[in-house]
Image (cartoon, helix red, strand yellow):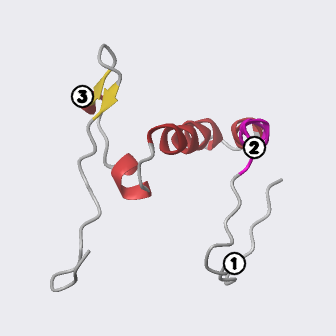
Amino acid sequence: MLETARGEKAEKGSAVLPTRDQFLQMVTAIRTYNVATCRAAADHVQFIAFCGARETEAANGLWSDIDFHRGTVHLRVIKTENPGTSP
């Protein structure tokens, strides 16, 4: 079973990405967990990781947004700057 820690804030710049093997093990663990929606959740995690989409961008995607011939994905919802802020 996967465990989560809630309410803890990561220190800025402290993120460490998993290795490819660690990532695939994590996806496999999600996919094979005994809950009906786990396969879809694992597919979602892989999609986000492989295309670089944010959660809301991936959640709002449609099959028609994927061009398999060109190998592209159209992301419908994008993160925007807040009004009055500079880049």
Relative to the observer, which residue lies in front, 13 or 73?
A: 13
Q: Secondary structure at mark 2?
A: loop
Q: CA distance from mark 1 to mark 2?
A: 23 Å
How many other residues sit within 10 Å of disc 3, few (<14), some (14-19) or many (≥20)?
few
Residue 43 position by quadrant: top right
Q: What's under tag 3, amino acid-wise?
A: Ser
Marking on residue 6: 1
Identify the element where label 3 is drawn: helix
Is label 1 in contact with label 2 (beta carbons under 8 Å)?
no
In this view, which residue lies farthest toward the front? 87
Left or right relative to 13: residue 60: left
Find out whether residue 23 is within the magenta segment.
yes
For label 3, the residue is 64
What amino acid does circle 1 point to?
Arg
Crowding at mark 2 (Cα within 10 Å: few <14, some 14-19, many 20+): few
Which residue is found at the position 71% from the left and 43% from the top? 30
Amino acid type of the residue tagged 2 in the rendering: Thr
Query: Label 2, on which residue?
Result: 19
34 over 55 or under it: above or below? above
State which region is magenta.
Answer: 18-25
Q: Residue at x 42, y 55 (%)?
A: 54
